[in-house]
Amino acid sequence: MEVKVTVNNDGGTVTAYEEGTQVGQLDFVFMQGGLSIEHTRTFKGHEGKGVAGDLVQAATDYAVDHNLKVRPLCSYAEAWYERHPQYSGMLV
C-alpha cells in the first residue's frame, strides 16, 4: 500500500492507494502548534485491511517530523491513539 501526505495552507489529506486505486483518506486541519484529525475513511471493499490505521500512522509520522501536536477529533483516530500509548505525549 502506498500512503501519500498532501498539505495546503489550511490542512491536508493523507491518501492510501492500493495498486493505483485510492482506498482511503484522512483529512486534517492545522491548528496552533499542531494538526487536528477531522475524518478518516476507508472506501467500500477495503475495510478491515488496516487502511485507516496506516492513514493515522502517516499523519502521526508527519506530525512527529514537523514537531506538531495532534488533536484526534475523528473517533477512529481517537481509538487508534488509545491503542498506541507511545504517542500520548503529543496529543492535545
Image (spheres, grey):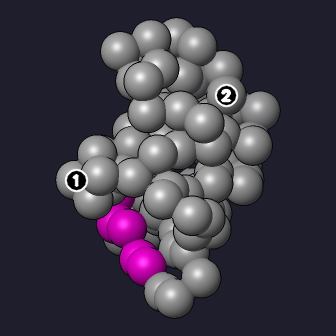
Q: Is residue 56 above or below residue 88?
A: below
Which circle, 1 or 2, is nearer the viewer? 1
Question: Tag 2, which secondary structure?
Answer: helix
The quadrant of the image that shows the C terminus is top right
Mark 1 neighbour class, 10 Å CA radius: few under 14, some 14 to 19, many 20 or more:
few
Which residue is tagged 2?
78
| Most distant residue in the left direction | 65
**Which range of residues does the magenta coloring cover?**
3-7
Q: Quadrant of residue 86?
A: top left
Question: Tag 1, which secondary structure?
Answer: helix
Query: Identity of the amino acid at label 1?
Result: Asp
Q: In the rendered structure, which disc, 1 or 2, sits on the residue that comes first in sequence? A: 1
Query: Identity of the amino acid at label 2?
Result: Glu
Which residue is tagged 1?
65
Q: Is residue 49 left or right of residue 31?
A: left
The answer to which of 28 and 71 lies nearer the viewer is 71
Mark 2 neighbour class, 10 Å CA radius: few under 14, some 14 to 19, many 20 or more:
some
Instruction: Give how far across and how far down residue 18 sits, in percent.
Output: 38, 56
Identify the residue at horizontal 28%, vertical 46% (top origin): 64
